[in-house]
Image: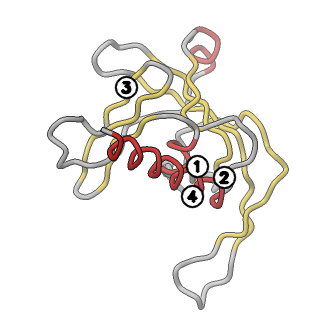
Amino acid sequence: MLSGRNFIILNHTQQIAEVFAYDATLPSKKIPIVTRTMAYMCPTSGTTYILIVNEGLYYGMRLDHSLFNPNQIRIHGHLLWDNPFDQEQPIGIEADGIFIPFQTEGTKLLFKTQSPTSQELRNCSVNKKIHGSHGRWSWHKSMQQEQLNSMKIQDQMTST
């Protein structure tokens, strides 16, 4: 998860990630990891949700948006549909009883958020964690869980 201008930091984790560019000639950067919050207003109901995101890379004000890792969202038990060609399921995230639909811009899937105002932080009673709070995320553990889930689905298919 990359954090942009559309959030407020709740906690500095005191952890640092070493981030490498795709261009091997560029040096790596040490980026702090934070817990952050952002506001999402449901276009259908008008309800504002305060979204809490754990373990995001903090890029300061250099990004005007945030980037989400679908695997991190899924491993924490939230449903994420990112196949725009699926006729049965709309694209988006289902987290804690709400559905956040994605919009498309070219090949990008997105949903609009903003930094929550102090009034929204005080008055919004709906707080949703869309990115786990179960300790540190591990890519290796995530891949193991994906393999287990795949084996369960295959087992269910063969037993019917």
Mark 2 surroundings within 10 Å by alpha-carbon count, few (fewer than 14), some (14 through 19), many (20 or more): many
Q: Please say if the residues under marks 1 and 2 sit with CB atoms less than 8 Å apart.
A: yes
- Spatial separation of the CA atoms under disc 1 and disc 4: 23 Å
Tell which of 15 and 156 is nearer to you. Answer: 156
Measured in 3D between alpha carbons, the distance from the residue under mark 1 to the one under mark 2, in whole angstroms, is 5 Å
Between label 1 and label 4, give the one nearer the viewer.
4
Task: Give the residue furthest to the front.
Answer: 159
Residue placed under numbered mark 4 in the picture? 143
Q: Is residue 52 left or right of residue 70?
A: right
Q: Residue furthest left?
A: 87
Q: Which residue is mark 2?
A: 58
Crowd tier of the residue under label 1, counting other residues whose Cα lies within 10 Å: few below 14, some 14–19, many 20 or above? many
Give the secondary structure at mark 2.
strand
Give the secondary structure at mark 4.
Answer: helix
The disc at residue 99 is 3
Residue 9: give x, y in percent of width and height: 69, 38
Q: Which mark is residue 3?
A: 1
Which sits earlier in the primary sequence, circle 3 or circle 1?
Answer: 1
Dot 4 amino acid type: Met
Instruction: Nearest to the eye among marks 4 and 2: give it.
Output: 4
The mark closer to the camera, 3 or 2, is 3
Residue type, label 3: Phe
Which sits earlier in the primary sequence, circle 1 or circle 2?
1
The front one of 89 and 63 is 89
The quarter in which the C terminus is drawn is top left
Give the percent coordinates (x, y) of residue 3.
58, 49
Front-lying residue, 149 or 25: 149
Mark 3 to mark 2 CA distance (whole Å) = 26 Å
In the rendered view, how is the structure colored?
Answer: secondary structure
